[in-house]
Amino acid sequence: MSTCSVADNSGDTAAAIDCLIAQQAKDHASLDTFYHIFAAALVFFMQAGFAMLCAGSVRAKNAKNIMLKNLLDACGAALGFYALGWGFAYGGQDADKTTFIGDYDFFLHANVDGHHAFFFQFAFAATAATIVAGTIAERCSMVAYLCYSTILTAFTYPIVAHAIWSKSGFLSAFNNDPLFGSGVVDFAGSGVVHLTGGVSALLAALVLGPRMGRFYDDKGEVLNPPKEMPGHSTALQMLGTFILWTGWYGFNPGSTLGISYDGAAEVASLSAVTTTIAAASGCVTAMATRYFASDPLARQYDLTAAMNGALGGLVGITAGCSVVQPWAAVPIGAIAGLVYLGASNLLIKLRIDDTVDAVPVHMANGIWGLIAVGLFCDPELKNAAYGSKHGGLFYGEGTLLGAECVCILFIVGWVTVVMGPFFMMLRKLGWFRVSIEDELVGLDVSKHGGSAYELAENKDSQKQAYSDFIKNADDNAL
Amino acid sequence: MSTCSVADNSGDTAAAIDCLIAQQAKDHASLDTFYHIFAAALVFFMQAGFAMLCAGSVRAKNAKNIMLKNLLDACGAALGFYALGWGFAYGGQDADKTTFIGDYDFFLHANVDGHHAFFFQFAFAATAATIVAGTIAERCSMVAYLCYSTILTAFTYPIVAHAIWSKSGFLSAFNNDPLFGSGVVDFAGSGVVHLTGGVSALLAALVLGPRMGRFYDDKGEVLNPPKEMPGHSTALQMLGTFILWTGWYGFNPGSTLGISYDGAAEVASLSAVTTTIAAASGCVTAMATRYFASDPLARQYDLTAAMNGALGGLVGITAGCSVVQPWAAVPIGAIAGLVYLGASNLLIKLRIDDTVDAVPVHMANGIWGLIAVGLFCDPELKNAAYGSKHGGLFYGEGTLLGAECVCILFIVGWVTVVMGPFFMMLRKLGWFRVSIEDELVGLDVSKHGGSAYELAENKDSQKQAYSDFIKNADDNAL
Amino acid sequence: MSTCVNLLAGTVQGQCFQNEIDATRNNIDTFWLIFAGSLVFFMQAGFAMLCAGCVRTINIKNIMLKNLLDACGGAIGYWILGYGFAYGSNDNAFIGDYNFLLVNADGMTGYDLSFFFFQWAFAATAATIVAGTVAERCRMIAYFIYSFALTAFVYPIVTRAFWDVHGWGSAFRSTGPRMFDVGMIDFAGSGVVHLTGGTTALVAAIILGPRIGRFKDEHGVKLLHPKDMGSHSVILQVLGTFILWFGWYGFNPGSTLIHSTPDASYTAAICAVNTTLSAASGAISAFGLRWFLSEEGLLDITALSNGALSGLVAITAGCSVVWPWAAVVIGFTGGFIYIGASNLLIKLGIDDAVDAIPVHFANGIWGCIAVGLFATGTLINKAYDAPTTLYQGWFYEWGNGSGDGRLLAAQLCGVLFIIGWTVCLMFPLFWTLNQFGLFRVSREEEQVGLDISHHGGAGVHLTKPTAEAIENHRRSSLDKSRSTHGQ
């Protein structure tokens, strides 16, 4: 195969060694590409998870509609991120400069960093876009959704990614002159992905208003308590949750962006462990709290709390998965479960209607995830993952917490400034919400040619058919 | 990147070479970590498979309940195995000693073997715990299930894993002084994982008793034949089966615990091939046998037999996947299919109620898997995987078969001794089973606030709504 | 642990390092195949869900059983015969004859074994394509026979021709002259896998005839508008689509077969990107066209998901040799082709329960042709061992002013061979089965649904407790907890 032996190098040992070094570098590149593809495939699979979670959480009459939105935003994200987003986010990055937006490698024409990097980042952009689908389900029009998801993946999200993950970003820890000397630690994107998606979801829910009959009755009177609109299939929700959890093992460990450089393997495996523990803690806390907070005469084990608690834990650990000790994942996850419950109740108090509780899971826990880094970050681990030591508040340092707070403010501000007016405009144009009739009858019938399900019509007629059939078969056999 | 060149080492060739060697060792570690993460993510995904399989196999009125149990045991396993299990199983292992239980690295405080190893082993522990959920579905209380799964992952399972997989285990093939000179070959855990889970399931089913109306009618008379209680969704069962099968490609090939050491790639590939062939054989045999054994006038292709046959084949090959020739996977899988059918019928004869047939699949085939190693193990392949030659009975050696039998006895005995009294105690306390009323109305309504499904009840009313809708739309347009 | 340190002579030591590096590369390659093979296998779940979602509720057990069995039958058929025919190493350009039943497993390296695993997963994919088309009316026994024949013989011959180093039409051929000096470039199998499966599906659908009530009413009078048979669950259909798309990241990038050379890893990465872009474009174009063509502005999710699959099939042949912009064009066209072919089938009265023919057959052809148009020399050099003379896609040759159409010609010949070969074998097989009444279920069975007639009952049981039962339960448990609290 290769030609590094001393004999091949005409007896020159030094040349042989250089040859071996070059080979090793190639092998590292191969291995890292492989790792990217593995992780990106898992992250892409999260699209299936979101689709199942949303499908299970909406009423049967809107199932097709929400699935369509989920599939379409994966497609829109691919094209939008290919055309513009990647260039805005990572084009022409340079650790010595600080820029607000990238301006190179649109349409992948220059192939900066290789295709594997694009593939991985596309999967992240698609995740950010799809978070909103669930919140505004059952009432948002398709056109509005298409416009929104294209803008998010082509412009809004790339700017955030550029600020925090690109080498030229003004908040980036990879810049040579980072903010407060530390830069923002958002390892796999509690902020970049989940907070961005979550804030968009909140804005959309505010502008769009609640589903009909959720908080107000026909006459516009406030309902107390609000009407529950349970999803049509818990099995699909659960499937979605498990797929998402599995996909997170590409999301968090994959964010090392390689496995061959010094220390990458340790960082990746630590991320896998903290991810696991935080998800488990979030699930248990959220379910137990909901259980003990419910009416003592009719205590219920609430599946939704359990599932969203796990997802909340996952979102909460995403920023810090590589820089906190495994024990810290327990409080981070546990608090994430409580944050989810609190935010979910608050939304209901404020009469903001979120069909799948995406705002509490992604926005509230996105914020918590960033703060948690500022509290629990272990300087040694940060050194392993980022090459510089900065600890969280519990290790006696406050700088990082400051940087994280700036990051939260920036993301919330930026997304609000861009998406807020955009949603308002959609609303003014009357494009944002489907008509009252469409909403009442369900979007599947009104927009998609019929219900998502054709289940057995009638059990009795089925039984009849079966007995007729058996009788015939017997007759024939005789 | 690399600083190994002769120039970097100030002309010292030997130092340059040492540097290269160190670099190579690091590369191997990276590759192995990556392999662990890949395999563990697939194994974790099996949780989704179990959840779907169980959800599809129970009646609609208990779907939420069973899925919640599946989610909670993943969470419980993560926390229990993190706190205690890992330390008991692998803490302070040493090939020169023989111990019954590990006593080090609780809460991962010492980070022995790296985080990736913990992540992989946690996924296995979660699998063992979740096997029981299906068997006792539709009647077991949530509290009992939580207690059970914590004990299993934190104590019972780790002891078994310690005995067979830790270097200090008294049955371990990795010990310097192994049992009968060979130790037990249970490559990926037919015994450690599936038999442990399966025996727990059997004990639980015995203590818990059958579902109401399954074997006895209202007046306590024996039903003949027993009442079928078909699962509510075959699609979910099938999805679960395919997810499990896919996850098994992490389970079996991943159990090499690395891909970079000499021969690991051979062992891993062989495992993938034998896994495939055994699953296929098990499926075909079980389905064909069920078909030809059924009433000739109304022959049925039974999906449940096909799916569980495939799973039986997978469990059966798990112990020996790395040490048998591909041809041997055919008889191992085929017999596994028959073992499944036999055990399933036997359970019904004995009036032991197993909702998802987990006992035949995991316990009966777990035993068969271990015995099969004792029969079909190829000395050359065992040498490649374990570094010492011992053949199965068909290669003229009996030692290994003896060791496998000891292993079966140990696992069955140990699990019975720990879990049997525990289940009896739960029963005495009245914590084990839900009330008669709850069982009859279904656990989703009684414990989880309502049914898992909210499908549009009535097609006619939907059609009416649709025609009203169209009419309105027309009117509006005019 | 490296053992190179104690060796004395510098030359020996160099060799020792070299061996270590080669071993590591071999390990990476093996891992790569296990990873990709697992993803490809997972596509079986995707097909099962897609089919289960598309058929009527009365037939879901039947269709899923077929999906499971062809994975199993495929494994056994491919193990017994198929692998030996396809990759058994003699010099024959048409068929191999070695290593049936993996009898020579002892002589296989780990990489060889994982190669078998990977190839089996592909064979199972080819077999499962047909399941959907013939759903709701095909007999189980016919399906067995067919899937065994396909994986054991028909498909292996095609893979031999276009993927093996000995194959007569292969761009990998190293043991003789390549077809038109280039050989057919079918990187991951638009032709080999999808066209083979799709052609089989087409032949089967023609001989089997449409489902009862699809094109004609009870009295045999042709319906003005073909009846939409209804599908069990759109959600399962979309789930299937997502799983398939996910699995395609093993299918296409994995087809590099190795990953440890810079060229291979570059190729794998570009395959992943092209796969993504083509799927997205196909989905949007099919969805848009269907919307545009429908009178009432229908937002058709079936068009969207099948459009994505069409884009995936279309890019499969060329994923390694076209630039991303071309992937967008290929996928976009693929979406149009899907809609056209789907409408054409209905016009011709050919009944395809899941639209597998438009997706796999029509776009399989398009995928192979697209390579002949868009393949670029830079990427061919990376993906294939440097050909003696480099011929690119026709658009590039045209741009160079040569207009050389050799690659396009090779692609067309490949397509014709695959269609011809598959029809020649499958048509007689299906025709014979049909003559003996083994192909189609009886009229009664079809009407009552196959789940009831063959599988012991319905696949879905959604009975819920009645409102009354729930109310009773609520009262009694309330009473109970009150009395406990009262104590």
Image (cartoon, coloured by chain):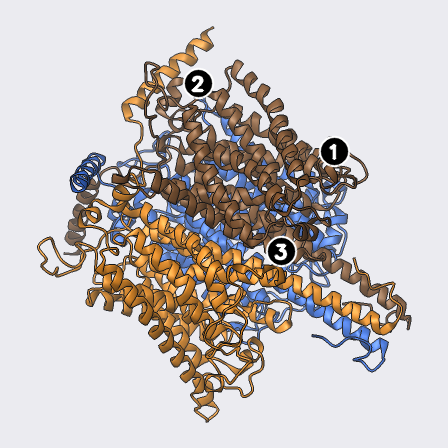
Chain colours: A blue, B brown, C orange
> Helix or strand or loop: what does disc 1 sit on?
loop
Give the number of the disc on residue A141.
Answer: none
The chain under label 1 reads: B
> Helix or strand or loop: what does disc 2 sit on?
helix
Q: Is residue C34 above or below residue C425?
A: above
The chain under label 3 reads: A
Mark 1, Cα crowd under 10 Å, few <14 / some 14-19 / many 20+, is: many
- Judged by depth in the image, the label closer to the viewer, 1 or 3, is 1
Mark 3, Cα crowd under 10 Å, few <14 / some 14-19 / many 20+, is: many
- Judged by depth in the image, the label closer to the viewer, 3 or 2, is 3
Question: C435 or A426, which is in the foreground?
Answer: C435
Residue C235: x and y in percent read: 36, 49
Asked whether the residues under marks 1 and 3 belong to the same chain, the reply is: no
Residue B158: x and y in percent read: 66, 33
Asked whether the residues under marks 3 and 2 belong to the same chain, the reply is: yes
**Mark 2 = which residue?**
A297
In contact (CB < 8 Å): disc 3 and disc 2: no
Residue at the image point whose x is 62% and y is 54% from the top: B268
> Helix or strand or loop: what does disc 3 sit on?
loop
Residue at the image point whose x is 32% and y is 23% from the top: B224
Residue A412 in view here:
no
Residue C422 in view here:
yes
**Mark 3 = which residue?**
A255
**Mark 1 = which residue?**
B102
